Image (cartoon, rainbow, N blue to C red):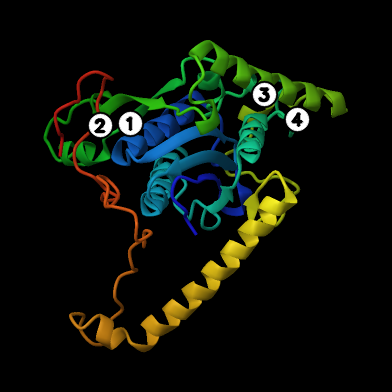
Amino acid sequence: MYRPKSIFEIMSRTVEERFLLPPTEEGRLLILGVLARALWAYPLVHLYAFTFLSNHYHLLASALDGGTLARFIGYINSNIAREMGRLHGWKGRFWDDRASVIEVVDDDAVVDRLRYVISQGVKEGLVGHALDWTGASSTPALLGDMKLEGIWVNRDRQTRAARRVNPPAPESFEEALQVKLTPLPQWAHLAAAELRARHQALVDDVEASASSIRTAPPLGMAAILAQSPFARPAESKRSSPPPCHASTAAMRSAFRATYRAFVEAFRAAALSIRDTAHELFPGFPPHGFPRPLAFVPAPSEAPRPGARSCQWPSGSPPVTTTQPAAPSG
């Protein structure tokens, strides 16, 4: 259930929890490049924060259109899987399952989830300070100018150029793209200095809380980078995801009621489609399955530019923040 304008916490875990997202500099730049490209392809998406650990990531985002947010998640997951698989020589399935997408239903809960995303790596005892983590993380941007730079590799052009007798250098297909974060809605009115102070307070709280319960020194980046990308943790701390993130029991109960009504209506509609598919899809040939249906917006929502954008858009995003680059096919 993707409700428009809601903020969602998105989490994806690698297959068998293998360390296929190691926090190397090359991996960091490639992941940031995918995020930057995705934000260009889906301009209705707002990205608030993210942290990529070695075997999973957490990300806070929203969109005016739920279908666009779903395609945005598919875009980043598919492209990160390709880039990291190519980087480490991993040819099998990359992600363990579909992304976990959990709605954050009130302002206090949104701040709490931002704190949780910032705490990744610190609360697990991997590093002592949030800025020590060398993988893809929004923390440096939250404490800076809300921007990060990554590298997008134009694989389409690279594949076509590989057929030439004298192909260009691999670096010629790299584009420096910028990830621009959006402030939380309740903090959007703050001046830049005050916004950084709010973020810094969350970072300080995360580090102080972790330090107060730490019984051993942090593992440290040297030990983390020495791990094989194909290794797995000795123990897993998986737990069932909550139906939503809420700051009060009343908000949580209200969401449950809304979701139950949504599920009942969804099941009834799905059953009617199954039983009358021959009438709903007369143009499809017999013995086939029509493609999955599109996202259904609320009746009051007008069509918006980009809300139905293709998952594989043509052209290239702007190389700079002032002038867009010419389309590259």
Residue 154, percent across and down? 26, 35
Task: Tell me which label, 1 or 4, sits earlier in the chain.
Answer: 4
- Which residue bears the numbered disc 1? 152
Q: CA distance from mark 1 to mark 4?
A: 31 Å
- Which residue bears the numbered disc 3? 202
Look at the numbered disc 2 and give the secondary structure of its residue: loop
Q: CA distance from mark 1 to mark 2?
A: 10 Å
Left or right of 328: which side holds 29?
A: right
Task: Tell me which label, 2 or 4, sits earlier in the chain.
Answer: 4
Q: CA distance from mark 2 to mark 4?
A: 38 Å
Residue 200, percent across and down? 63, 17
Q: CA distance from mark 3 to mark 1?
A: 30 Å
Q: Nearer the viewer, residue 143 or 174?
A: 143
- Which residue bears the numbered disc 2? 317
Look at the numbered disc 3 and give the secondary structure of its residue: helix
Instruction: Note whether 272 is above or below 163 in the view shown.
Output: below
Residue at image x 26%, y 86%? 279
Residue at image x 54%, y 19%? 140
**Residue depth check, mark 3 versus mark 2: number of the one nearer the observer:** 3
- Which residue bears the numbered disc 4? 125
Q: Amino acid at mark 1?
A: Trp
